[in-house]
């Protein structure tokens, strides 16, 4: 048990990312309100960003800038951070688009409940 606790303390960013992803997935799967589903998706995206950035980190690593005084230090990998910046920009764009769609659905159906919208669509197609 002590070894497991030590491993969790060392790898806490991964543990937190898994917990966040699970919370987001449960929110998406259990809620019918479209705003809550979108928040769950954003929580899952944040967990993925945390996982990638934690994967690029090296304990005791230096910023990847060449220093003549220290010729061969251990550098942190900058690629995951750069990729996650791009991911964040895409995430914000997709969130804004999804919010616009949800607002449009609310204007059309008068609700943001996915089950109720599906029922209304079925009533229209059957009638």
Image (spheres, rainbow, N blue to C red):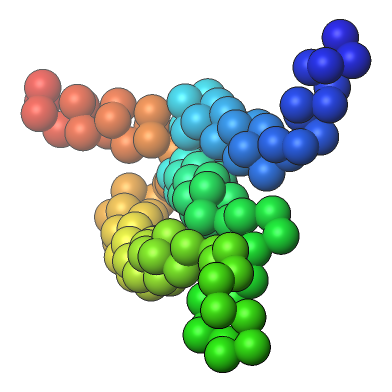
- Residue 31 can be seen, yes or no: no
Q: Name the quarter where the C terminus is drawn.
A: top left
Q: Which residue is drawn at 41% across and 70% down?
A: 82
- The answer to whether residue 78 is above or below residue 101 is below
The reply to whether residue 9 is visible in this rendering is: yes
Measured from the top left, where is residue 63 in percent x and y? 59, 76
Nearest the viewer among 123 and 71 is 71
Quarter that holds the N terminus: top right
At x 63% / y 80%, what residue is drawn?
70
Q: Position of residue 118 (x, y in %)?
A: 28, 30
Q: Can you name the residue that lies furthest to the bottom here?
A: 68
Residue 79, by quadrant, is: bottom left
Q: Where is residue 114 shown, x and y percent of the image? A: 38, 35
Residue lying at the far top in this picture: please name it: 1
At 60% across and 32% down in the image, what residue appears?
18
Q: Is residue 73 left or right of residue 106?
A: right
In the image, residue 85 sits, relative to residue 125, either above or below, namely: below
Q: Is residue 91 above or below residue 126?
A: below
Give the vertical position of 126 relative to 62 (above or below). above
Query: In the shown orientation, is residue 40 left or right of residue 107?
Result: right
The reply, left or right, for residue 1 in relation to residue 98 is right
The location of residue 68, given as percent across then percent down, is 56, 90
Q: How many marks?
A: 0
């Amino acid at each position: 048990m002590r070894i497991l606790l030590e491993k969790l303390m060392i790898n806490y960013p991964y543990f937190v990312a898994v917990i966040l992803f699970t919370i987001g997935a449960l929110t998406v799967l259990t809620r019918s309100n479209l705003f809550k589903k979108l928040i769950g998706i954003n929580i899952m995206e944040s967990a993925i960003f945390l996982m990638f950035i934690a994967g690029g980190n090296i304990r005791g690593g230096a910023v990847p800038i060449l220093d003549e005084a220290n010729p061969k230090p251990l550098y942190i990998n900058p690629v995951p951070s750069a990729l996650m910046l791009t991911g964040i920009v895409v995430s914000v764009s997709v969130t804004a688009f999804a919010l616009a769609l949800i607002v449009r659905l609310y204007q059309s159906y008068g609700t943001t409940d996915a089950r109720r919208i599906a029922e209304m669509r079925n009533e229209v197609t059957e009638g």
